[in-house]
Image (cartoon, rainbow, N blue to C red):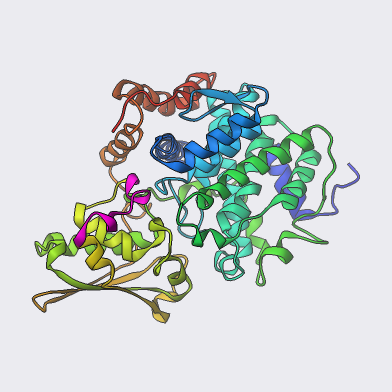
Amino acid sequence: MAIRQTAPLTETLADFVAGFSPSKVPERVRGYATEMVLDGSGALLAAANPKLSTGRLISQFVAAQGGKEQAWVVGHGFRTSVVGAALANGTMGYACDYEPHHPGGVLHPIAIMVPTSLAVGEMAAASGERLMAAVVIGCEIEYRLSMALGPVEQYNLGFHPSAVCGCFGATAAAAFLLGLSAPQIVRAFGLAGCQASGLMAWESDATENSRPFQMGVAARNGATAALLAGQGFGGPVAIFDHGHTVFGAFSRKPAPRHLADELGARFDGIMELAIKPYSSVSFLHPGLDALLDMVRENKLKIGDIDRIELRFPTSGTHCIDNNPLKSHCAQYILPVALSAEGLNVIDLFVDRRESDTEVRRLAGRIAVVADAELEREFPARYATVVRVTTKAGKTYQRRNDVARGYPQTPLSRDDRHAKFRAVAGTVASAGRVAQLQREIEGLWQAPSIDTYARLMGAAPDAGR
């Protein structure tokens, strides 16, 4: 107890996690969290497709390391150590770039929290409601830290908010599932600070492997921090308050008040998550909506279009303008979406410019323009203006501030569930997908997560 009252922010968050229980999750939050876990589980399972190098290689790596069989490696049919499973599953959680995201926090928390909670929850023999509560609390801590550091601040310094802040969210989720005390959680957060990492350097990796790897690292390191603290391992005791804090390391304009304001009264870390209708970076989604709506309304085909201009907030253009990663490249994603009126996960791993002459042609006719006016709303909104010029000389323009799938513009229940069936169905039989959906929808009432874990862990048994 000697550490009490010496680090108010760190201790407040530790007390919150230690004193949390599923009963503190409001009913509306429970329902929304279920939809997020369903959507994230589909994207996670789809990453086990052997055609996708990320899941194949990371699973081979953890299998080679060996370890006590504590948790399933999703979609690969074997169990490994809890930290190995967190690493592999966290990496796969973001591989397809199709899981729920947090626009304001510029985060992918479900990609980290579902793998962390699944791995640690298996080891801890958790109930379904404790797993779900862990996801909620992990998303909340990750979001609050990103807002306290400032998402744009992190980007400007070259850090990846999801990776840096996700380590702390994973620590909170794991600590909750392990039933750690508040003093132990203080040290766990300190140990998370010692491991928090993630540079935007992955933007130069066209394999798309290192981009999701950082989510796996966040999941593994968060689980490690909680496990070590639970065994009595020492750690910094004021990571959010004094000394070498996260604020000094990852931001130049921090706003620490965001960590604890209305803590426990608001659950914006979950409730502001958006479901992706496209498997690509979320920065491109408002533009994709606008572009696809314009071509449908005007009965245009990809061959009719001469050039496209996409205007985007200044701070985000570096991420989407001729990025080597197909998932983050406007010049790739826009023509591919036009060619098929949508996107498939496999499009991120097979370069359509090599096989489709129209995609290749239009890719060279797309300009991304930094817009200072749109910057005023970033990152709260990814406001985008799309201007299409046809070969016939006609011009169409549309601005879109909020993409489909956001809480303000939600996908219908039928659309959400159709997405889950389609995405999970790339590797799993229809019967397995249906059973998995039932299990996820019943997690708040489930006495065990064993069936959910087993259905997620089984190797591909069907799919396209």
The one of 357 and 191 positioned closer to us in this rendering = 357
Q: Residue 214: where, in percent of width, then height? A: 57, 50
Examine the rendered structure and indicate whether residue 253 appears above or below residue 216.
Answer: below
Residue 282 lies left or right of residue 180; in this view the side is left
Span shown in magenta:
345-357
Q: Residue 286: where, in percent of width, then height? A: 32, 62
Q: Which quarter of the image is occupied by the N terminus?
A: top right
Examine the rendered structure and indicate whether residue 123 appears above or below residue 264.
Answer: above
Examine the rendered structure and indicate whether residue 238 appears above or below residue 63.
Answer: below
Q: How many marks?
A: 0
Q: Residue at x 71, y 38 (%)?
A: 224
Our reading of the magenta stretch's main secondary structure is helix
- Does residue 318 appear anywhere in the picture? yes
Q: Residue at x 73, y 66 (%)?
A: 248
> Which image quadrant for residue 228?
top right
Q: Residue at x 12, y 74 (%)?
A: 391
Q: Residue 303: where, in percent of width, then height? A: 13, 64
Q: Is residue 354 magenta?
A: yes
